Image: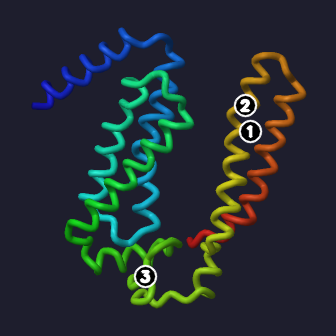
Amino acid sequence: MSYLATILVVLIGMVIGWNAESISSIWGWLMMALGGGVIMPNVLRWHWWRINGWGYAAGVMGGIILSFLPVLKPEMPVYVSFPLICAGSLIASIVVSLLTKPTERGTLLAFYTRVKPFGFWGEIKTQAQIDEKEKAKTGEEPWRLLLNTLIAIAGITGLYLSPMYLVEHFYLQSGLWLGTALVAGVILYFTWYLKLES
């Protein structure tokens, strides 16, 4: 069966490669369409207690199927197809999760107690009995997580763009982006790393 699956994947890749106009179009499809199809189930599993394996699988499969929308309708702009793919994946995850049995409460409590995520955890949060002061000690407040995410995005962007500008001999831009990455790293050291539990 695994040989058959491997051959099928290779054949699908060959068909896509044969019909693709450029590497850029394949990359765009992978990042926007296919990425959009799997992002919502991955976000839900961290922020909603009710998602289960079935809901996650349905969201991913629904997203993968919907990711072919730009292939079938190439005239559809990305700003239209991307939200449709994300919404379809989100709806599939929610509906299937609600129609199937939830994850065992003990598993959810163990996860919530260890990770302390923010989001829609309702009864699980109440049963875990973790007060806000305890969460604040670990730096897990929602505002801090969002701030650290934005700082990390700036840092990763700097690490990505700095060598590109350097290769093209745009030394000023390369230095500015490298500086951005370094500043982001220093800020994250204080706002994130020092607050990690050992």
Q: Give the total of numbered labels.
A: 3
Q: Is 63 rendered above or below residue 146?
A: above
How packed is label 2: few (under 14 Cα within 10 Å), some, or many (20 or more)? some
Identified at 54% across, 29% down, the residue is: 77
Q: Amino acid at mark 1?
A: Gly
How packed is label 1: few (under 14 Cα within 10 Å), some, or many (20 or more)? many
Q: Who comes first in sequence, dot 1 or dot 3? A: 3
Q: Which residue is mark 3?
A: 122
SS for callout 1: helix
**Cα–Cα gap, marks 2 and 1:** 5 Å
**Cα–Cα gap, marks 2 and 3:** 41 Å
Q: Amino acid at mark 3?
A: Gly
Q: Who comes first in sequence, dot 2 or dot 3? A: 3
Q: Which mark is residue 186?
A: none
Q: Which residue is mark 1?
A: 158
Badge 2 vs badge 1, beta-carbon distance below 8 Å: yes
- Left or right: where does residue 180 sit relative to residue 41? right
Identified at 74% across, 38% down, the residue is: 158
Q: Nearer the viewer, residue 53 or 83?
A: 83
Q: Nearer the viewer, residue 102 or 144?
A: 102
Image quarter for residue 128? bottom left
Q: Which mark is residue 161?
A: 2
